Image: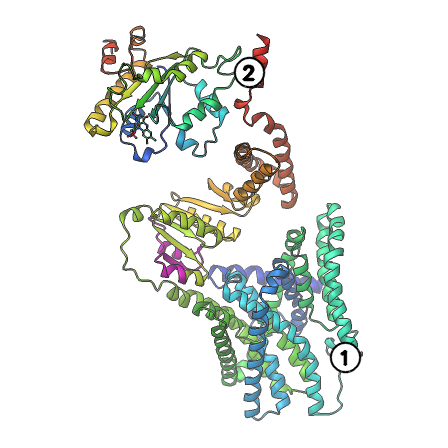
Amino acid sequence: MASVLLLFAHPAFHKSRVNKILIESVGGLDNVTIHDLYEEYPDFNIDAAREQELLESHDILIMQFPFFWYAPPALLKEWEDIVLEHGWAYGSTGKALEGKKLFCTISTGGSSQVYSKGAKRFTIRQLLAPIEKLSQLCHMDFLPPFTVHGTHLLKEEDIREHAERYRRFVFALSSEKLDCSKLEKLDTIDENADKLILKAL
Amino acid sequence: MHGEDFFIQAFMYLAAAVIAVPIAKRLGLGSVLGYLIAGVIMGPFILNLIGKEGQDVMHFAEFGVVMMLFLIGLELEPRHLWRLRSSIIGMGGGQMFITSTVVTVIGIIAGLKWQASLAIGMILSVSSTAVVLQSLEERDLRKTDGGQKSFAVLLFQDMAVIPILAVIPLLALAVTTGHESHAVSVDSSWVSGMAAWLQTIVVLSVVAGIILAGRFLARPILRIIAQTRLRELFTAASLLLVIAIALLTTKVGLSPALGTFLAGVILANSEYRHELVGNIEPFKGLLMGLFFIAVGASIDFTYIIDHPLLLILLTLSLMAGKFIILFILGKIFKLSFDQNMIFSLALAQGGEFAFLLFSFALHKSVLTEAITKPLMVVVAISMAITPILLLLNEKFLQPRLGTREKEGRQADSFQEENSVIIAGFGRFGSIVGRLLRAHGVGLTILDHDSNSVDMLRKLGFRVFYGDASRLDLLEAAGISTAKLLIIAIDEPEQAREIVAIAQKHYPRLTIMSRANGQQDAYELIESGIKNVYRETFETSLCMGREALRFLGFRAHQAHRASMLFRRQDQRHLHELVDTRHERKTYLTATRQKIEDLERQLRQEAESYDEQLDKSWDVDSLRRAAKER
Ligand SMILES: Cc1cc2nc3c(=O)[nH]c(=O)nc-3n(C[C@H](O)[C@H](O)[C@H](O)COP(=O)(O)O)c2cc1C
C-alpha cells in the first residue's frame, strides 16, 4: 500500500468546519501521515531537511488547504520555496520526487458556479497552474484537485458526505484500486471519481 | 592540642552534625535547629562530650559568620546595597536606638546603675546574624521583603558593634577608676594606641584600600590562579582572601564580617563570583554548623534548672520586647503584616556578639558576673528559640494569612478543565501567567512574596502563599486535577525539588520548568522534563538578531539566522545531555561549561553558512543556466 503525506495548511484550524471534518476522516487511515504545517511551524521557520526526509519516505503527496484569495495560505507557499531545493527536487540532479503523485484538496467559500468554465471565469484547475507546473518540474504526477465548494452554506451532514467521499478516494488511490488513466481526464475529483474505483474493492 | 585529640573532637562534631541535621530536616525543623539540638545533646548537660573548649570552638566558628557575609556580599551589587540605605539606617538605627533606650530605662528602674543599664541595653539590642540569616536562607525567605529588611538591620548592627566596643570602656571609667585589663582580643588592634583622628584616617584608608584592591588587584590575581587549573589552589586563594581581609579589618578595629562583606560586594560583578561562592560555601556551611553546635552546647541547663523562673521571665521579656519594637518599626516602614511577622520574629533575639561584649564588659568591670551570667544564658536560649518561632510562624500562622480567600467565585468549565498551577509569580512567572489569563486559562498561583500575593488576590486570582516544594501546598492548589504545572521560580534547587515531588506523586502530570542556565537545563532534562526553558535564552537571541540587523543584515535574514540558531542550539542541548555523564566524571562544573561552549562554537562554525536560506540561493541555478 502506498504511503500518503498530507501537507495541511490552515492558519485558523480552530475555526474550521470543513477541513476539520475532512482531516478527521482521512486521519483514520493507517497509511496517511498528517503533517499540519501551521502547527509545526507557527513561526514560518521551516526545517527543510526534515521536510525533505518526510517527502522521501512517502509515495503520494496531498496538499490540503482552504482557498484564500484563489491560492494556498502563505505558509504553504513558503514551504514550497524552502523545501523544493534545486538539485534535490529539480535540476539535473534533482530526482527526489520523481514518480510521486500529487494532488490538492481545496475548500472554497465560492460555489462550484464561481469556478465553472466561462468567459470571465477560471476553474480551480486553472488557478492551480503554479502547483501543476511545479509538479512537472519536479517530475511528479499531478492529479486533478479534490474540491469542496460553497463551504459557507454547507450543513454538517453535507460536509460529512464530502469527507466520506474523500476517504474513499484516498484509500482507493493509495491501495492502487483506481483507474488512473481515466482520472487524468477529470477536471476535479467530484462525485464522478467514485466510478473510477475498481469494483474489486 | 594533640593530633589524636583533634581527630576525636572533629569526629564528635561531624558525627553530631551528620546524625542530628538529617533527622531535624526530616521533621521539618531545619538545619539550624538540628545543629543546636546536636549541641545540646553533646553539651555538659546530657552527654558531656564538649567541655570547656566549647567557648573556643564558638569563637573559631564565628568565622563562619564572616564567610557568610562575604557570600552575601557577593550576591549584592553595590547599586543594590545603595538602594537598601534607608532601611539600613532607618530601621537598623531605629531598632538599636529604641531597644537600647528601653532596656536602659528598665535597668535603671530595676535599680542598676545607668552605665550598667546602658551597656546591657546596647549589648542586647544586637541580634544574631548567624541565626537570622541561616534560618531565613533555609526557609527561602532571604529575598522576601521581610528578609531584605532583616538583612539591612543586621548590617547596621554589625557596624554598630565597633562604637559599642569603644563606648563600653568609657562607661567603666565612670563606674570605677583604674582596673585596666587587656584580656579581650579586641584591644590588640594596631590602632588602639593612636589618637582618635589618626584612627579614623587609618580605618578609612583601610576601607578605601579594600575597595581599590578589590577593584583592580583581586581580579588579575584570581585570573593567574585560575589559569593554573589547580582547583585546590583557587580554594586556597579564596580562603586566603577572606582571612586576609578579616585579619586586616580586625587589626584596625573594624568588624571582620563587615570588611569581608564589603569585599564581597566589590567582587559581586567579577567573573570569579561563582567560583568564589562555590569554594567558600562549604567552609561557611561547616563553620556555621559548628557555631550552632557550640551555641547549643553552651546553654547551661544546670543553671536554667536552678533559676527557671528568672530565666523564663527574662527570655520572654527580651524577645517580646524586641519583637514589639521591631513590629512597630516594620509597620512604620510599611511592611505587610506577614512580612512584618517574619521580620520581627527573625530579629527578636540576642546575638553572638553579646557573648563577646558581655565578657568584654565584665573585664572592664562595667558589669558583674551576677548580671552577665543569666543574660548570656538568656541570649543563648533566645537564639535557640528563634528558628522554632520562624518554623511555627511558617507552619501555622502564614498559611492562615495566605489562604484567607473568598472561595465564592465560580470558575467556568474551561477554567476548571484547563487548570494550570504556576509556582512563582515574579518577573518570569508573571509574564507566563498574564498571557494565560488573557486567554481565560484557570490559573492557580503559588508564591512566597506576600506583597504580590495580596495584590493578586485582590485582582481575583487564586493564590496560595508559601513554599511551592511542599506537597500539602501543591495539593491545596489542586495539583491532583491540574493539567499542567509551570515552575517559574528563580531558585534552581527548589525548582528541582518541586519537580521531584510532583513527579513522585503525580507521575502523569505535565511539567514545564524555567531553567536558570544550561547546566540547570541539563539537570531538569535528566530528571525527565521535556519542557525546559532557559530564562535568558530567547532574549539573548533577540539581542543577537538586532545586532545582526544593526550590522547590515536585512530584517528577515537576521530573523531567520536567529531561528536557525535556536533550532541548532536546542539540538545540541539534547546531545550534550546525552553525553554529559561520561564527561562529568572528570570535569568540574565550570570546566564542563567551558567545554560545552567550545563544542557549540565549533559545531556552529561548521554548519551555519551553508544552512541559512539555502533554498533561496540562486547561485546553483545560475551555474546550471550557464552550463547549458
Ligand atoms: C482571507 C480569506 C480569503 C478567502 N479567499 C477566498 C477565495 O479567494 N475564494 C473562495 O472561494 N473562498 C475564499 N475564502 C473562503 C474560504 O475558502 C472558506 O472559508 C474555507 O474554505 C472554509 O473552510 P474551513 O471551514 O475548513 O475553514 C477566503 C477566506 C478567507 C478567510
Q: For numbered disc 1, what is the local secondary structure? A: helix
The vertical placement of B190 against B244, above or below, is below
Q: Please tell me which residue lies in front, B327 or B165.
A: B327
Chain letter for mark 1, please.
B
**Which residue is label 1 attached to?**
B196
Q: Is residue B471 magenta?
A: yes
Residue B104 left/right relative to B183: left
Which tag, 1 or 2, sits closer to the chain's start?
Answer: 1
Q: For numbered disc 2, what is the local secondary structure? A: helix
Percent from the top left, x then y, of residue B286?
62, 61
Nearer to us of marks 1 and 2 is 2
Residue drawn at 69 percent across, 91 percent down:
B174
Label 1 with label 2: CB-CB less than 8 Å: no
Q: Is residue A129 magenta?
A: no
Quadrant position of the N terminus of chain B in the picture:
bottom right
Q: Are the numbered discs 1 and 2 placed on the same chain, yes or no?
A: yes
The outermost residue toward the front is A119
Residue drawn at 24 percent across, 29 percent down:
A152
**Which residue is label 2 attached to?**
B621
Quadrant holding ligand 1? top left
Question: Which amino acid does the dot numbered 2 rest on?
Answer: Leu
